[in-house]
Amino acid sequence: MTKCLLQGDFFILIIIITFSFRETRTLNYLCRKEIHLFKQNKKHMKKNLFTILLLAVITMPIMAQRPVKRASSTVKKTVTTVKKKVPAVLPIIVKGSTQGINDGEKVYVAIFQNRKMNNLDSATIKGGKFEMKNIKVSAPIMGYLTIGKEEEMVFDPIYLDAKVITVNKKGKESSNADITGSPANVAESAMNKELQPFNKQINDLRQEYMAKTTTAERKKAIEKQFDGIEEQTKVVQKKFMEENLSNLLGINILSQSYYAMDPEEVQADINKLSPQFKNGEITQRMKEWVVRQRTTKIGNQFTDFAMKTPEGKDMKLSDFAGKAKLLLVDFWASWCGPCRAEMPNVVNAYNAYKDKGFEIVGVSLDNNGEAWKKAISDLKITWPQMSDLKGWQSKGAEIYGISAIPATVLIGQDGKIIAKNLRGEELNNKIAEMLK
């Protein structure tokens, strides 16, 4: 199921797509989001970008230093000096061999930080060998081994969590290096090998989908195949995640998968994390998500919130929840390609059931009011809309633990949550069932 996970620069998005084949969501994104790229205007592409922020967070040092303000020299004071704990620097050596790559090519180790790739060190391949000795990080993080120029660059995830890391890189393909030196790197390499057959299927289907001769009927069939492949990759990822919750690979997969999981399962996995990860920023974010999901789980009473309509009037969820026979709360945004692709189905459902007690409240994660209003008009949305125009900081999205869109919450006339995240045929079937 295709969703948007954040807003971000298109170029960064393509970079992430290129090297993140191992992410289940990225596999799905690679095919389905690229499809939306061609079907929709580029500006409607997501961030996914929960992945972009996620990668940025993953690569952030665990502790940040704030400059210390010194007392003014013109005022006589007794100053007690407090020694701040400075993160230890981890010197790392990355060395390796290459096959099928020309001597003279540059190899880099980089981390994704501040919305861009930042190189930590580089080396030139000589005699099929390379070595980097100047890599320093303040805490174990996930980085990327890159080779080649920007337009031809290939990426391999590499965990910077050991003193010496060894790479065996065969050919110019992303995510195919055999990396050793720590449990996370060994497990990552093993997982990539298991995912390679799925990668090939994705690439073959993507090329067929983009072909001018591919019919609309065949494209629908390909989309179903994409979903089937995604489910298979999830099985592989889940296995490696559960086996590696004591190292960076496990928390990396969990942090990019948790929003599609059951909150109790997420909490159980958090409990299994290595102590060094249990209090990290990403883990805290996941814990907060679990709390929100428990509060708004199926069977619970809806939680109210208020925002503004496109006309600037105050509107509350409780203006509709518990009053309509069936209320769909639809979280979306004008910039989200998958949201726009799903909207015709929502429009059809609304037109079919609005006279039977079905109502929709749209909650937009837009920042731009004019773009929001234009999308309402372009997509023929006629049901009530509200937004605080705070994007991913939307209060409504925060309350309901929304980390990917489109997202839906179905509320019965008693004000209790009936279902969540229904789309397409599943949504239509549920509406028909509740209003028969």
Image (tube, rainbow, N blue to C red):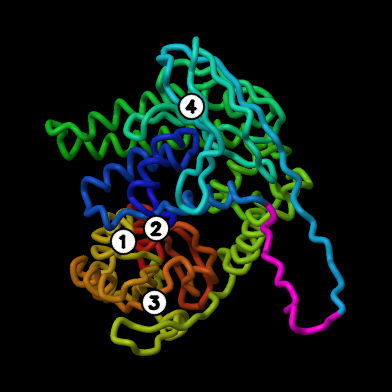
- Choose top left, top right, bottom left or bottom right for residue 246: top right
The label nearer to you, 4 versus 3, is 4
Q: In this figure, which residue is indicated by the disc labeled 3?
A: 387
Image x and y of residue 125, in percent? 48, 18
Whether residue 419 is situated above or below residue 102 in the rendered picture: below
Q: In this figure, which residue is indicated by the disc labeled 2?
A: 7
Give the residue type that dot 1 points to: Trp
How far apart marks 4 and 1 lie (CA) works out to 36 Å
Give the residue type that dot 3 points to: Ser
Q: In this figure, which residue is indicated by the disc labeled 4?
A: 107
Q: Residue at x 43, y 14 (%)?
A: 103
Q: Residue at x 41, y 32 (%)?
A: 229
Residue density around tag 4, few if under 14, some if 14–19, many if 20 or more, within 10 Å: many
Q: Nearer the viewer, residue 163 or 193?
A: 163
Query: Please, what is the dominant secondary structure of the magenta stretch?
Result: loop
Magenta span includes 68: yes
The label nearer to you, 3 versus 2, is 2
Say which element carries label 4. Answer: strand
Give the residue type that dot 2 points to: Gln
Whether residue 301 is situated above or below residue 60 in the rendered picture: below
Evaluate if marks 1 and 3 touch, with contact meaning CB atoms under 8 Å apart: no
Which numbered disc covers residue 335?
Answer: 1
